[in-house]
Image: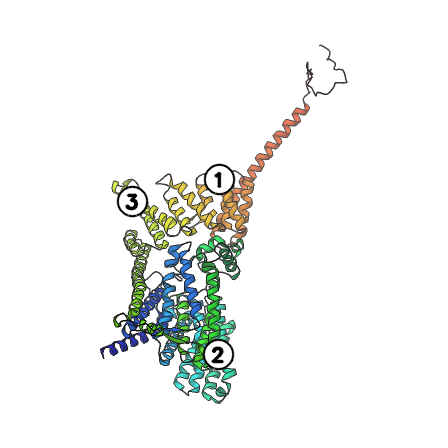
């Protein structure tokens, strides 16, 4: 009896977790961390996947058998996880592959392994259609709520409904990405269409109304978002549903008044919303304040060029999971500098296929293609074998997700939802022979029966305990790292708030706690070095009142800042151009305290250029980036500074800062004409109403005056030279005494005319 109660509790916990996963994957975020969205979602994904794996292991021990569902997707999933592991082992940045890049976080090897285990934990433990239907319903409702919040933000209504600083401004949504929310809305729209038809067939008016409402809300967001990934996901999902309804269920729909009423209402309302959204005169006439936000992504051409270059150098396993930022800086083409976002570094390409191509090589790409083809084949077979609307909706969602991620790289939410949708689809086909889905029982007793072995009862079910050990081996380190990482992120947020309020000392103490909890992110180390530099500057403001203790504190802070930048560049991620340019900046800030810092800054800046060779900013410098040319200029080496600025112009011919600095360097070299010419180019590149334009205009006047003076001086010098030459011509030439060689050279010409001596006066 107690055993049955425990099993019921395990099943109830598993069901609750299954319902909660899509809801939290879409809606969960917290403003207590510096990264509200992606970081919180990846922590939830790690925790939920770990919990699902542990529940599965406990259930296996309790029932004394390990049940695993086998499906046609296994080979693709298996190859993809093997590719991820090998890519991590051979990664050019081990820390990035293990823990992910800060800010994007996904992918990393921990989340890859746990999402893989989550898929099998769900497929092996979902036993009833009720769980599948309720999970799909929770997903659609959660997607609709997220889409509603996104819509309110587009129409600038969140400021009134959510009076928080983090919710202000257009574009706020619970996923932190309009493209991600668009893809989720697109597949939720497709599922809603399928479920409307299903509910109408069952004459369930309440559910027809519910799914018509979810279709309206997600459809509104699709129209409002108006971006390629959203349209692709929505188009593929809804088209798949529509085609299946038309060819396989049109007779039922034609007889259902409820279905026709819902369909006509949906089409009319979406058409009206589209008119309001896309016709500016109508939008302004109705007084609607509508702001569409978009997302900056890398273009497809550059993504392809980077992917092929990375594949050339790392053909089999790629550069490593979560190393795309390094791939970008090293392999981006020169044409990228002509794009509007030339000054940005991208951590992801324009689509998931490009990311796999770059980071996981041919093995990863092959695994992904096998998985995609398996999903397509399995979905089509499932629809053919079990032609009901739940199968159609889940298959449509699978296709929509895959299509959307061709045009947008996966993140935690998209990967999470993809695993859930595929797990639900596979679980829903367990009773369909044609789908090739079956439960396989792994136990020593089952194996011994097949092999006609006779094992003692005490030895029979050791396999379930082995599985429990594996589950603990995976989940305990993951949960430990997750808890520590979350604490670190909370400390980081608190430290940054303190720093923004001028409490640098408080920020220093808090940030040390962040690094103690998570010492693996180079972003944390860079921030810590920045705080050290800020404290040094604060102490230096005392001037003559600096005490011996102050000097000791300053030296300690210098040592700490140097240690942080050495860790980021020599240990954590030596191939990160951002780490080396930050190292150059830190040493540049220390030049007043250490004479060797200037050369260290130059060395770091040169290394940054090696890792980001086509970046013109690294030659010029801007903000917290110290350019090589700027270092030369500060050292008084104006000739080399001019060369660096000229190199930046070769990389980007419309870079106003490069022309400006080149002009100043040429002015220092007294090359006034060239300096004025380059300053004129600056004026052509700058907006006429900007403050920089006024400064450049004033400089140009000075340079033109100097150039004019130089021309006048040159003209005077030329006139003087000409006068001197004229004077020389007018003066009589004195007679020259011929030189007679007493011993002619061997090859001297023979003299044919007599040489006469002039008469002596």
Mark in the foreground, 2 or 3: 2
Label 3 crowd (10 A; few <14 / some 14-19 / many >=20): some
Q: Is residue 170 something one can see in this rendering? A: no
Q: Position of residue 237 (x, y in %)?
A: 48, 75
Query: Is residue 655 depicted above or below 395 in this figure?
Result: above
Marks counted in the figure total 3
Reading the chain from its start, which is encountered first: label 1 or label 2? Answer: 2
Reading the chain from its start, which is encountered first: label 3 or label 1? Answer: 3
Element under disc 2:
helix
Do the residues under discs 3 and 1 have CB atoms within 8 angstroms? no
Which residue in the rendered view is the most extreme toward the right?
753
Do the residues under discs 2 and 3 have CB atoms within 8 angstroms? no
Instruction: Give the residue number, with chain letter if any, for mark 2.
Output: 241
Residue 587 falls left or right of residue 400: left
Q: Position of residue 695 (x, y in %)?
A: 48, 48
- The front one of 561 and 626 is 561
Where residue 728 sits, quadrant-wise, is top right
Element under disc 1:
helix
Label 3 and label 1: CA atoms lie apart by: 34 Å
Residue 598 falls left or right of residue 7: right
Instruction: Give the residue number, with chain letter if any, for mark 1.
Output: 638
Label 2 crowd (10 A; few <14 / some 14-19 / many >=20): many
Instruction: Give the residue number, with chain letter if any, for mark 3.
Output: 556
- The front one of 295 and 372 is 372
Mark in the foreground, 1 or 2: 2
Label 1 and label 2: CA atoms lie apart by: 67 Å
Element under disc 3:
helix
**Which quadrant is home to the C terminus?**
top right
């Amino acid at each position: 009896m107690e055993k049955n109660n425990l099993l019921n509790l395990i099943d109830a916990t598993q069901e609750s977790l299954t319902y909660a996963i899509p809801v939290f994957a879409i809606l969960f975020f917290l403003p207590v961390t510096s990264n509200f969205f992606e970081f919180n979602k990846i922590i939830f994904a790690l925790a939920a996947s770990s919990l699902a794996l542990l529940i599965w292991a406990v259930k296996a021990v309790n029932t004394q058998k390990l049940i695993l569902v086998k499906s046609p997707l296994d080979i693709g999933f298996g190859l993809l996880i093997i590719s991820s592991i090998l890519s991590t082992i051979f990664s050019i940045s081990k820390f990035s592959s293990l823990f992910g890049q800060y800010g994007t976080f996904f992918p990393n090897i921990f989340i890859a392994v746990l999402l893989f285990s989550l898929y099998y934990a769900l497929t092996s433990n979902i036993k009833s259609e009720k769980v599948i239907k309720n999970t799909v319903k929770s997903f659609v409702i959660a997607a609709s709520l997220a889409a509603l919040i996104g819509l309110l933000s587009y129409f600038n209504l969140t400021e009134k409904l959510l009076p928080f600083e983090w919710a202000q401004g257009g574009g706020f949504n619970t996923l932190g990405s309009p493209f991600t929310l668009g893809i989720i809305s697109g597949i939720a729209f497709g599922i809603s269409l399928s479920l409307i038809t299903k509910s109408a067939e069952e004459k369930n008016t309440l559910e027809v109304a519910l799914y018509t409402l979810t279709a309206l809300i997600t459809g509104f967001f699709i129209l409002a978002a108006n971006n390629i990934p959203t349209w692709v996901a929505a188009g593929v999902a809804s088209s798949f549903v529509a085609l299946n309804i038309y060819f396989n269920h049109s007779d039922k729909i034609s007889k259902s008044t409820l279905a026709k009423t819902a369909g006509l209402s949906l089409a009319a309302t979406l058409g009206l919303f589209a008119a309001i959204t896309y016709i500016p005169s109508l939008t302004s006439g109705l007084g609607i304040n509508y702001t569409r936000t978009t997302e900056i992504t890398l273009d497809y051409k550059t993504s392809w060029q980077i992917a092929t270059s990375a594949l050339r150098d790392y053909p089999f396993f790629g550069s490593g999971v979560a190393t795309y930022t390094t791939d970008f800086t090293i392999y981006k083409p020169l044409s990228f500098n002509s794009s509007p976002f030339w000054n940005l570094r991208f951590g992801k390409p324009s689509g998931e296929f490009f990311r796999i191509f770059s980071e996981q090589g041919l093995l990863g790409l092959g695994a992904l293609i096998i998985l995609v083809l398996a999903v397509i084949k399995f979905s089509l077979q499932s629809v053919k074998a079990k032609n009901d609307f739940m199968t159609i909706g889940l298959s449509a969602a699978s296709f929509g997700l895959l299509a959307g991620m061709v045009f947008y790289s996966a993140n935690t939410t998209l990967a999470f939802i993809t695993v859930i949708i595929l797990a639900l689809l596979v679980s829903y086909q367990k009773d369909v022979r044609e789908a090739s889905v079956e439960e396989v029982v792994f136990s020593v007793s089952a194996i011994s029966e097949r092999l006609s072995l006779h094992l003692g009862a005490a030895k029979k079910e050791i396999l379930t305990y082995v599985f429990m050990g594996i589950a603990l081996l995976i989940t305990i380190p993951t949960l430990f790292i997750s808890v520590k990482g979350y604490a670190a992120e909370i400390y980081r947020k608190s430290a940054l708030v303190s720093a923004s309020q001028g409490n640098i000392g408080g920020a220093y103490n808090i940030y040390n706690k962040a690094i103690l909890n998570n010492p693996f992110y180079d972003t944390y180390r860079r921030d810590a070095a920045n705080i050290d530099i800020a404290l040094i500057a604060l102490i230096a403001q005392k001037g003559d009142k600096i005490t011996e203790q102050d000097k000791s504190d300053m030296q300690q802070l210098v040592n700490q800042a140097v240690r942080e930048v050495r860790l980021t560049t020599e240990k954590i991620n030596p191939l990160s151009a951002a780490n080396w340019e930050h190292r150059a900046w830190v040493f540049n800030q220390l030049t007043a305290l250490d004479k060797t810092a200037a050369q260290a800054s130059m060395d770091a800046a040169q290394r940054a250029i090696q890792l980001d060779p086509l970046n013109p900013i690294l030659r010029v410098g801007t903000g917290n980036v110290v350019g090589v040319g700027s270092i030369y200029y500060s050292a008084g080496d104006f000739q080399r500074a001019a060369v660096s600025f000229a190199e930046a112009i070769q990389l980007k011919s419309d870079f106003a800062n490069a022309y400006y600095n080149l002009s100043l360097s040429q002015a220092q070299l007294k090359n006034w004409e060239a300096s004025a010419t380059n300053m004129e180019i600056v004026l052509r590149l700058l907006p006429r109403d900007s403050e920089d334009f006024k400064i450049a205009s004033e400089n140009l006047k000075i340079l033109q005056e100097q150039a004019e003076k130089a021309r006048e001086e040159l003209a005077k010098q030329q006139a003087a030279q000409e006068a001197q030459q004229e004077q020389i011509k007018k003066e009589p030439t004195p007679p020259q005494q011929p030189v007679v060689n007493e011993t002619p050279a061997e090859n001297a010409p023979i003299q044919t005319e007599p040489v006469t001596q002039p008469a002596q006066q």
